[in-house]
Image (cartoon, rainbow, N blue to C red):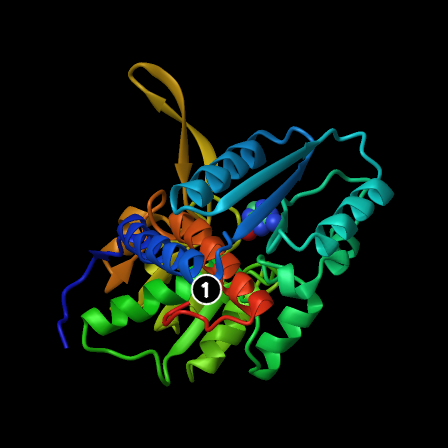
């Protein structure tokens, strides 16, 4: 096994090759079925970060030849109106994937809205049916960010002639979107998994026990360099906007949950922010939409999807 340090995991490059493969699947599926996979993204309100994510999702969906629809609702929309829309999309045979962008405005329950989505069209993999399927080891739709993180981890391990099996994995963050499904995926890879969070005692020590460290806390540079074990794999899920002072004045910059430069010195391999996990999330959304399309149309799921 190679024993270099500071290998940078190229999430943007991996996502591009995944999208290229998915574009080929879309075209073959169109040939056999005469249909085009269709993803509908619903956004409620004007959250600026969500607007950017949704725009990127729409563009990348179209770029691989799928149909993209974006439904923009004002933040005055009632929960009942949103639930009615979800119900219509559930019943529309042309729609294969439904994604309701989170966070929703405070007057809505995201759990209730997610629960209303047909699990077969739940391309986020957030519905309890899909979460339960993942937990008990049944095939289902897996949340995009953990799925993309696992792909990067497996690929990095393979490059080093290594395996995830038996490794100590520490996930910092216990969200339904990232922390919990990431734990299930790593458990299924035979890792020994710890989910740490804001109340974990001796967090630095817990992190130092990790052969695989996944940071999903949503706080800029929260994980320090000396929390990273020698030769660990580090996956940084954070996307945090901070202000930095430059000679030209104060500028906004996107950084991860890990103090990247300091962590890189210890890590065997680490994802950067940006261009690490972020691009994998959308690529996996496209992957999940193709899987949903195949399942709904009784078509064989292409290899690797
Ligand atoms: N908001 C931030 N990330 C996500 C995501 O992966 N899915 C949805 N629906 N909303 C998000």
245, above or below 262, in the image:
above
232, above or below 224, in the image:
below
Residue at figure coordinates x 55%, y 77% from the top left? 139
| Image quarter of the N terminus | bottom left
Disc 1 on helix, strand or loop? helix
Which residue position is annotated with label 1? 147
| Image quarter of the C terminus | bottom left
In the image shown, does 149 or 247 lie closer to the viewer? 149
Residue at figure coordinates x 74%, y 55% from the top left? 91
Residue 52: x, y in percent?
51, 33
Residue 203: x, y in percent?
50, 64
In the image shown, does 281 or 211 lie closer to the viewer? 281
Q: Give the residue at the far top of this rendering.
A: 248
Q: Is residue 180 visible?
A: no
Among the 4 quarters of the image, the one containing residue 4: bottom left
Say whether mark 1 is within 8 Å of ligand 1. no
Among the 4 quarters of the image, the one containing residue 275: top left
50, above or below 265, in the image:
above
């Amino acid at each position: 096994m190679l024993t270099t340090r500071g290998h940078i995991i190229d999430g943007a490059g991996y996502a591009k090759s995944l999208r290229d493969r998915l574009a080929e699947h879309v075209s073959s599926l169109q040939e056999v079925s005469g249909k085009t996979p269709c993803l509908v993204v619903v956004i409620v309100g004007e959250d600026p970060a969500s607007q950017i994510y949704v725009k990127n999702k729409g563009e990348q969906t179209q770029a691989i030849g799928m149909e993209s629809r974006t439904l923009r609702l004002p933040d005055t929309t009632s929960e009942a109106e949103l639930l009615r829309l979800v119900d219509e999309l559930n019943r529309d045979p042309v729609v294969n994937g439904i994604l309701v962008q989170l966070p929703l405005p405070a007057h809505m329950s995201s759990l209730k809205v997610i629960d209303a989505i047909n699990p077969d069209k739940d391309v986020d993999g957030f519905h309890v049916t899909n979460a339960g399927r993942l937990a008990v080891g049944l095939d289902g739709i897996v949340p995009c960010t953990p799925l993309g993180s696992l792909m990067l981890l497996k690929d990095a391990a393979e490059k080093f002639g290594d395996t995830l099996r038996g490794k100590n994995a520490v996930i910092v963050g216990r969200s339904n979107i990232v922390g919990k499904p990431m734990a299930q995926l790593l458990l299924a890879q035979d890792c020994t998994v710890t989910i740490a969070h804001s109340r974990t005692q001796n967090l630095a020590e817990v992190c130092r026990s990790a052969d695989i460290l996944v940071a999903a806390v949503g706080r800029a540079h929260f994980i320090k360099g000396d929390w990273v074990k020698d030769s660990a794999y580090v996956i940084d899920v954070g996307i945090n906007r901070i202000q930095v002072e430059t000679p030209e004045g104060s500028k906004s910059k996107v950084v991860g949950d890990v103090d990247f430069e300091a962590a890189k010195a210890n890590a065997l391999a680490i994802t950067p922010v940006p261009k690490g996990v972020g691009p994998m999330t959308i690529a996996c959304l496209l992957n999940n939409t193709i899987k949903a399309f195949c399942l709904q149309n009784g078509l064989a799921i292409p290899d690797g999807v």
